[in-house]
Image (cartoon, rainbow, N blue to C red):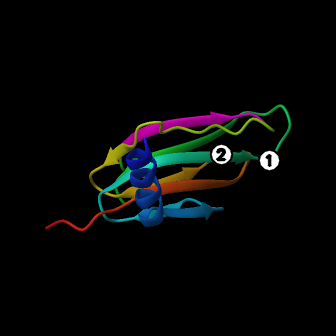
Amino acid sequence: MKEYAEGVLDLSEHCSTEYITGSRMVTAKPCYVFKVLVAPTTIGTASRVYARNGEAVTSPIVLDLGAQYAHPTHDGELPIFFNRGLYIELNSNVAGVTVQYYTRART
């Protein structure tokens, strides 16, 4: 169990975490997405966030996340692989999104 915990902590040190307040490319590199936390702005109104596999708003949607006020969603018990990079698209009623992801150097 100790080795597992140390491995998780070691991986966590190499992850990037960003808070995003507008639609944009997060990384152009292939990456593993561990967590996506949606912070909605309006009580009682659903919010939508799309995580896209690529560098643009036209890239394929991999995750379609929704949240209600005071109940932010999160995905990624197992990481999801984005082979063309990661673009986060925020739609109505979203204050921001926290994304935790990992990119590795290819050898």
Whether residue 55 is situated above or below residue 72 in the rendered picture: below
Most common SS among magenta residues: strand
Q: Is residue 98 left or right of residue 30?
A: right
Q: Residue furthest front?
A: 2
Q: Dot 1: few (<14), some (14–19), or many (≥20) neighbours within 10 Å?
A: some
The verdict on residue 98 being magenta is no
Amino acid at circle 2: Val
- Camera-side residue of 103 and 68: 103
Q: Nearer the viewer, mark 1 or mark 2?
A: 2
Residue 41: assigned label: 1
Tell me residue 75's x, y (percent): 52, 37
Whether residue 28 is situated above or below residue 47 in the rendered picture: below
Q: Is residue 77 left or right of residue 44?
A: left
User: Does the image show residue 66?
Assistant: yes
What residue appears at the point 51 percent right and 36 percent down from the top-left corner? Answer: 64
Tell me residue 96's x, y (percent): 68, 55
In three-dimensional space, the C-alpha distance between marks 1 and 2, rounded to whole angstroms, equals 10 Å
- Camera-side residue of 79 and 65: 79
Q: Which residues are magenta?
A: 60-69
Residue annotated with mark 2: 38
What residue appears at the point 41 percent right and 37 percent down from the top-left corner? Answer: 78
